[in-house]
Amino acid sequence: MLTIPAEEFKLRQKRAQEMVREAGLDALLVHSHEADFANARYLSDYWPIFESAGVVIQSEGDPMLIIGPESETFARDHSTIPDIKKILYYREAAEPDYPDIVIDSFEEVFASVNNGKGVKKLGIAGWTAMPISVYEALRNALPGVEIVKADDIMYRLRMIKSDNEIAVLKEAFKVCETAVEAVLSGMKPGMTELQVVGIAQEAMYRNGAEYEAHPTYVLSGINSSHAIGRPTYRVLQTGDLVQLNIGARVAGYSPSIGLPVCVGKMDAAMKDLVSFGLEAHHKTMEWMKAGIPAGEVARNFFDYVEKKGYGDNLLYGPCHGLGMIEVERPWMESTSTYPLQENMTFQVDTYLCRPEYGLRWESGVRITDTGVEQFSDKYRGIFEIA
């Protein structure tokens, strides 16, 4: 499978350092954990398990990887950053004391940065992911240091995708397609939602996924009305609309394909909503190209859905960023002011619902000067299984 080369990680680290200087920071601490891993992995290729992870970008000097006490050998085998520090506060949530493990301290780490000059102003990226225990430990270790939210540095770094990132996303979508095909071939009435998840997972891992891009959505019947949900032991029944959203993570990148599938034949009302959802999905892509304000696309989408008479079926839309996390910044909302730029990547996410069921069409695109490049257009239409 494709990977991001080591040279690209070095380039990311260099660009991050330049942005730290431009922001007037002495250092940036990029914080991540197992679920929201993207920022730290983007800079280091290290993805923590149980513990947290962080990257310190100095205004002068090389980056450092921050890990918990148990992960040293794991981190050394995976990180593109060789300077690794073990911090107690990056331990797992059970809070062991580790009396027999030699660890580093925040005081030592930040006293050593910038060739021993230390820090007066520290930025935090991953602000919403950082627990209060880590923030308080930082605050106590760095009295008098100004600590500020600096997520915009990582947002800007990750927003425009490189050729390597685009290639990995394309590879990951191919894996997603194999899993969708397996589900459409193997899903039957009488199965539980979780049994169908098993079909998808087997196909993902057999075809090169390192993990699921997100918990696999197999949401049937009333469960399909959940915009965010988890599969259950509910048994698929004839007449159910099933919300499928199947994503495979490859080399840290996490796309997804979403489509509604009926167990049996759709009635007229269900087919009407499913068909309009696909129509709105395609229209959204028609409005997208480099130079267009993101808010304009969102307003066009909401206006279109309202004028067609489906406003009551709408929860949100129409797009969110795609990359290492399947839902990442930037969102595309009516309040968005940024312009679309070439090589931004988005999941076009069209969700409509009624009280008794819901549906989602979802696919990934790359912004181009003339429109969008679709990463996958294989599964569009009315899907019914016997």
Image (spheres, helix red, strand yellow):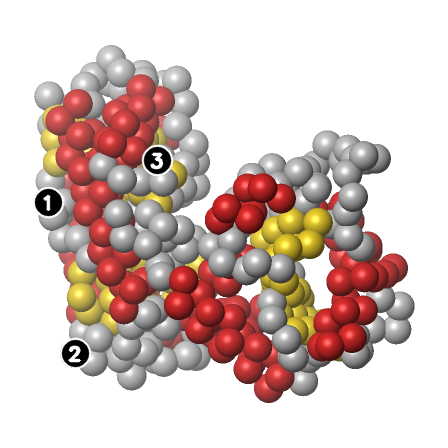
Q: Position of residue 251 (x, y in %)?
A: 36, 50
Disc 2 marks which residue?
Answer: 370
Instruction: Tell me the distance, in whole angstroms, between the alpha carbons under discs 2 and 1.
Output: 25 Å
Q: Position of residue 334 (x, y in %)?
A: 41, 70
**Residue in the picture at 83% in, 73% down:** 145
**In the image, 64: left or right of 187?**
right
**In the image, 232: left or right of 138?**
left
Give neighbour class at mark 3: few <14, some 14-19, many 20+ (Cα, 10 Å).
many
**Residue in the picture at 51% in, 71% down:** 13
Disc 3 marks which residue?
Answer: 217
**Residue in the picture at 61% in, 79% down:** 20
The answer to which of marks 3 and 1 sits earlier in the sequence is: 3
**In the image, 100: left or right of 261?**
right
Give neighbour class at mark 1: few <14, some 14-19, many 20+ (Cα, 10 Å).
few
The answer to which of marks 2 and 3 sits earlier in the sequence is: 3
Q: Which mark is residue 381?
A: 1
